[in-house]
Image: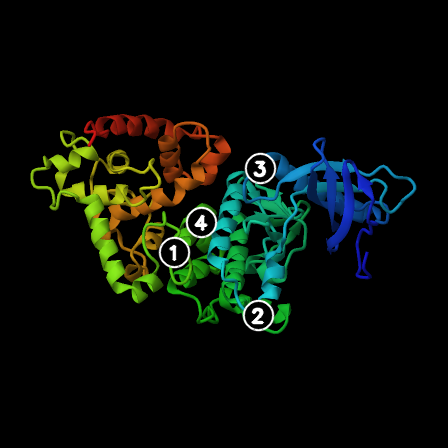
C-alpha cells in the first residue's frame, strides 16, 4: 500500500471470505475501502470493493458509534434493492487473531465503481460535468427509492455518489442514514457542513441524536446538483465556516440566493426549490417529483433529450433548419395521416388509434394521437392508452381542480411537474391552474410516458399497467414492487383504467 493514512490498513493479497485484496481505493474517518477479486467456479474473476470497518484499535465509545453506523448501513441494504443504490455482494466478520487490528472487523463487499462524483469533479478542473443532467436524474431516482422505503440518507454529497463503469450512478455510504419514526429520524452528530441544511445547525442533541427529516436530503441534493452542473458550491466563501455563514444568512432572509450564471432557468429553479430556506419549503418537493423535473431539464441545452428521443436537439434544429422543418412535417403526418382534424369524430383515419364510437371527445382526437405517437419505438405508449389515462384521471374534464392534491386539468398535472415537460419557451415559469388547457396538458403526458416506458422493461406483469402505475406513483415504486404496487389508491384506480383501455382499444387493423 502507499504511504497515505489508512484507517484500516490491509495488505495486498489479504483474503476475506472468497475475496482477495488487490489495492487500496479510499479511506475515511471510520473505514477504508479496498478493491478485491475472486474467481468463481467457472474461472471468471469477479471484482468488488471491500469496506473495512475496524474494531481492534477503538475505544468502547468509538466501538458503540461504529457499531451503530454499521448497523444502519446494513439495514439500508437489507431493506432496499435499487438500480441506483450500490449493491452489497456479501458481509463478513474477520476472524484473524494474528492480525489484532483486523480481528473482528466487519467487511462489506459491494459493487466496484469506477470513481466517485467528487473525483470526477476534481478531474474536471473546477468546472461542471458534461453528463451532470443525467447524473442528477439518477441521483434523484436513487434518493426517491431510499425515501419511499422510509429512510433519510443523511450524508448525500459527491464523494458518496459513485459512478460505475457504464456511467450510471449509485448512491453509497449509509453510515449516517436513519429510518423514519413518523415524520423524522435521528442522526448522530456529523456530516458534511457544506451539504447540511441550516436547521441542522440549530437542532439540539437528544438522547436519540439530532432530529433530521428527508428534506435535509433535498437540501444536499440542491448543493450537489449545483456542484455537478457548475463545479461550484451554491454559497460563497473560502472556508466551510464562511459558506455556512452565507447559507445561514440566506435561510434567515438577510440575503438572496445567488446561483452561478451558467445555470439554465430550469436548473436554477430546480436548485432553488431544493435550497428552500426551511423544511416546510423543501418538504413540498419530493425526490420522485424532482427526478421527473430533472429528466425534463436534462432535455435542454447541450444534453440529449430525455423524453423518448423523439425531438431533435436545439443545436440540430439551428444548424439544419430545412431538416428540422421536414421532421416537423413528418411528425405531423405521423399523427394526422389523413390530412385534417376531426369534424364529427368519425373520420376513418382515427380508427387505427382508438374506438371512434366511444366517449372520447372528438375535439381532443388530434392531441391524443400526437401524445400517443411520440415514441414509436415504445409500443406500450399508444393513443388509446393516453385516452384511457385522461378518462380515468378526469373523465375528460379540462376544468378539474383538485386543490388538496395540487392536481389540475384534464391530465391532473401538478403545475411544478408539468412545467418541466412544456416546450422550451414555456419553461421559464410554473403554469397556473387556469392555464393548463388540454392543448398544454395532453402532449406532455406522451412525453412522460415515453420517458419512463424504457425504464420498466423487464418488470413482471402487464407493461401498460406498470407504466400507468408509474404515472400515478413512480417508476422506482413499480420496480421495487415487481409490478403494480398494492396501494389503496391504485386498487380503486387500476380497474377503471383497465376498463377504459378495453373500451378504447382500436378494432381497425390498418
Residue under numbered circle 1: 299
Which residue does the image show at 65% across and 37% down from the upper left? 75
Alpha-carbon span between mark 3 and mark 2: 34 Å
The outermost residue toward the bottom is: 238
Which residue does the image show at 37% across and 38% down from the upper left? 472
Which residue does the image show at 80% across and 51% down from the upper left? 8
Image-based side of 216 in relation to 441, left or right: right
| Quadrant assignment for the N terminus | bottom right
Q: Is residue 407 visible?
A: no
Alpha-carbon span between mark 2 and mark 4: 25 Å
Q: Between 22 and 157, which is closer to the camera in this rendering? A: 22
Q: Earlier in the sequence, mark 3 or mark 4?
A: 3
Tags 4 and 1 in contact by the CB under 8 Å rule? no
* Disc 4 crowd, CA 10 A, few/some/many (<14, 14-19, 20+): many
Image-based side of 335 in relation to 494, left or right: left
Alpha-carbon span between mark 2 and mark 1: 24 Å
Q: Earlier in the sequence, mark 3 or mark 2?
A: 3
Residue under numbered circle 3: 80
Q: Earlier in the sequence, mark 2 or mark 1?
A: 2
Position in image of residue 352 (x %, y %): 19, 34
Residue under numbered circle 4: 291
Residue under numbered circle 2: 126
In the picture shown, does residue 9 fall above or below 429?
Answer: above
Tags 3 and 4 in contact by the CB under 8 Å rule? no
Amino acid at each position: 500500500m502507499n504511504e497515505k493514512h489508512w484507517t484500516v490498513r490491509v495488505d495486498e493479497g489479504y483474503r476475506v471470505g472468497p475475496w482477495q485484496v488487490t489495492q487500496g481505493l479510499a479511506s475515511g474517518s471510520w473505514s477504508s475501502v479496498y478493491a478485491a477479486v475472486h474467481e468463481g467456479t467457472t474461472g471468471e474473476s469477479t471484482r468488488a470493493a471491500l469496506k473495512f470497518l475496524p474494531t481492534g484499535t477503538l475505544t468502547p465509545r468509538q466501538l458503540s458509534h461504529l457499531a451503530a453506523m454499521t448497523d444502519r448501513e446494513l439495514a439500508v441494504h437489507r431493506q432496499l434493492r435499487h438500480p441506483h443504490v450500490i449493491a452489497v455482494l456479501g458481509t463478513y466478520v474477520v476472524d484473524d487473531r494474528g492480525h489484532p487490528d483486523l480481528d473482528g472487523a466487519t467487511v462489506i463487499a459491494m459493487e466496484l465503481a469506477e470513481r466517485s462524483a467528487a473525483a470526477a469533479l476534481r478531474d474536471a478542473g473546477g468546472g461542471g460535468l458534461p453528463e451532470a443532467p443525467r447524473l442528477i436524474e439518477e441521483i434523484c431516482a436513487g434518493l426517491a427509492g431510499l425515501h419511499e422505503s422510509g429512510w433519510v440518507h443523511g450524508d448525500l454529497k459527491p464523494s458518496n455518489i459513485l459512478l460505475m463503469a457504464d456511467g450510471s450512478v449509485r448512491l453509497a455510504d449509509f453510515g449516517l442514514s436513519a429510518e423514519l419514526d413518523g415524520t423524522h429520524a435521528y442522526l448522530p452528530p456529523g456530516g458534511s457542513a457544506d451539504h447540511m441544511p441550516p436547521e441542522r445547525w440549530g437542532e439540539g442533541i437528544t438522547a436519540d441524536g439530532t432530529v433530521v427529516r428527508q428534506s435535509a436530503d433535498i437540501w444536499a441534493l440542491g448543493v450537489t446538483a449545483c456542484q455537478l452542473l457548475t463545479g461550484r458550491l451554491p454559497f460563497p466563501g473560502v472556508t466551510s465556516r464562511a459558506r455556512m455563514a452565507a447559507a445561514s444568512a440566506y435561510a434567515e432572509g438577510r440575503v438572496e440566493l445567488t446561483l452561478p450564471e451558467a445555470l439554465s432557468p430550469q436548473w436554477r429553479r430546480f436548485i432553488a426549490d431544493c435550497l428552500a430556506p426551511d423544511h416546510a419549503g423543501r418538504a413540498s418537493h419530493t425526490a420522485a417529483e424532482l427526478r421527473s423535473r430533472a429528466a425534463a431539464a436534462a432535455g435542454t441545452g447541450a444534453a440529449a433529450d430525455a423524453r423518448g428521443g423523439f425531438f431533435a436537439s436545439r443545436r440540430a434544429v439551428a444548424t439544419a433548419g430545412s431538416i428540422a422543418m421536414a421532421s416537423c412535417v413528418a411528425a405531423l403526418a405521423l399523427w394526422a395521416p389523413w390530412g385534417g382534424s376531426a369534424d364529427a369524430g368519425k373520420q376513418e383515419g382515427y380508427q387505427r388509434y382508438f374506438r371512434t364510437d366511444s366517449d372520447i371527445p372528438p375535439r381532443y382526437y388530434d392531441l391524443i394521437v400526437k401524445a400517443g405517437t411520440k415514441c414509436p419505438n415504445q409500443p406500450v405508449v399508444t393513443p388509446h392508452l393516453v385516452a384511457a389515462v385522461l378518462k380515468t384521471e378526469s373523465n375528460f374534464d379540462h376544468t378539474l381542480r383538485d386543490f388538496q392534491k395540487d392536481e389540475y386539468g384534464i391530465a391532473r398535472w401538478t403545475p411544478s411537474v408539468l412545467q418541466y415537460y412544456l416546450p422550451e419557451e414555456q419553461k421559464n415559469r410554473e403554469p397556473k391552474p387556469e392555464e393548463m388547457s388540454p392543448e398544454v396538458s395532453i402532449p406532455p403526458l406522451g412525453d412522460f410516458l415515453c420517458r419512463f416506458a424504457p425504464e420498466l422493461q423487464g418488470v413482471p406483469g402487464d407493461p401498460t399497467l406498470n407504466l400507468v402505475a408509474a404515472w400515478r406513483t413512480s417508476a422506482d415504486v413499480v420496480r421495487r414492487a415487481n409490478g403494480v404496487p398494492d396501494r389503496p389508491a391504485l386498487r380503486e384506480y387500476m380497474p377503471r383504467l383497465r376498463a377504459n383501455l378495453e373500451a378504447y382499444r382500436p378494432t381497425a387493423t390498418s
